[in-house]
Amino acid sequence: MPTSVDRPAMVSTCMARLDSGLRIEAANADFFSHVARSSTEICGRSIYDVLHPSARNILPKHFMRLSDGHGSRFVERVVAMRGNDRVFSAEITGVAVKGERDDFSGVVILMSPDDEPAERPAKPAPILTALDARILEGVATGASTVQMASRLYLSRQGVEYHVGVMFRRFKAPNRAALVSRAYSMGVLTVGTWPPRAVPDFVK
């Protein structure tokens, strides 16, 4: 029986093969299940079509290094799209594929979704101040500390302090994980760019 695209498997590693232009050539059933789309919907489309727009701030440098031969693999955390209006956080491993002449011919993507995606509570408790929300939005768009400091009239140390507070609050080790967990908790809006903090989570 075909695997339903509406119910992701509980334990899986999603795998997809990308060509040199980062278009999806093929993928396994777990990949189709987690992104809630069929092979006919996504084969031939860019890998970015199944990832949240925030991935474009993180992954291009990794793909560039693979294509230039400056590395053979990378590991990164991203937010992926499940259908058009849901998200899940995952760890992605990208492995360069070489052609017959040892030139770059594509990438194999291994995506390990978080085991138990956090569900948005029916009535969430505010966890961000208004300033925290603006800084989280800046981090999600890829803004640097200097850019956020200038925009919010803070010192660089002030921005880093608030980012550090959110690292502890979201139990995130770095900015990519902070954004990933904020999306998985429903703290950041889905399907809009630039991202915005959901008002229910802001004091």
Image: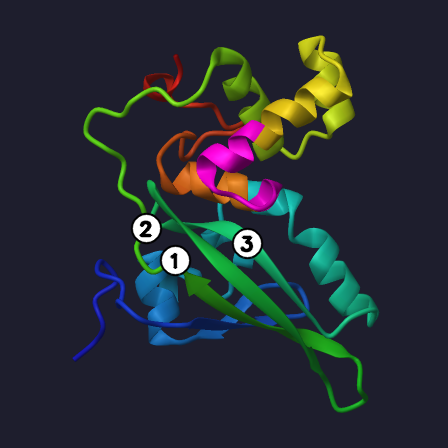
Tag on residue 117? Answer: 2
Residue at 73% over, 30% down: 144
- Regarding mark 2 in the picture, which secondary structure is present there? loop
**Residue 74, how many percent across, how many down?**
66, 66
Question: Could you tell whether 192 is left or right of 77 in the image?
Answer: left
Q: Tag 1: residue type?
A: Asp
Quarter of the picture holding the C terminus:
top left
Residue 46 appearing in the image: no
From the viewer's side, name the closer residue of 104 and 76. 76
**Which amino acid lies under the numbered mark 2 shown in the image of this protein?**
Pro
Sequence-first disc among 2 and 3: 3
Near-viewer residue (75 or 106): 75
Q: Is residue 9 above or below residue 176?
A: below
Residues at circles 1 and 2 in contact by the CB criterion of under 8 Å: yes
For the residue pair 33 and 128, the one nearer the viewer reads as 128
Percent position of residue 99, x then y: 73, 85
Lower position in the chain sequence, tag 3 or tag 1: 3
The residue most toward the top is: 153
Which stretch did the figure color magenta? 165-176
Query: Disc 3 marks which residue?
Result: 77
Q: Please tell me which residue is depicted at 54% across the width and 36% down the height of the picture.
A: 167
The local crowd at label 2, few if under 14, some if 14 to 19, many if 20 or more residues have their Cα within 10 Å, is some
Q: Is residue 145 magenta?
A: no
Of the 4 image quadrants, the one containing the N terminus is bottom left
Question: Distance between the Cα atoms at labels 2 and 3?
Answer: 14 Å
Q: What residue sits right under mark 1 in the picture?
A: 114
Q: Main secondary structure of the magenta part?
A: helix
What's under tag 3, amino acid-wise? Arg
Q: Is residue 122 above or below residue 99?
A: above
Report helix, strand or loop for mark 3. Answer: strand
In the rendered structure, does residue 168 fall within the stretch colored magenta? yes
Question: Residue at image x 69%, y 53%?
Answer: 60
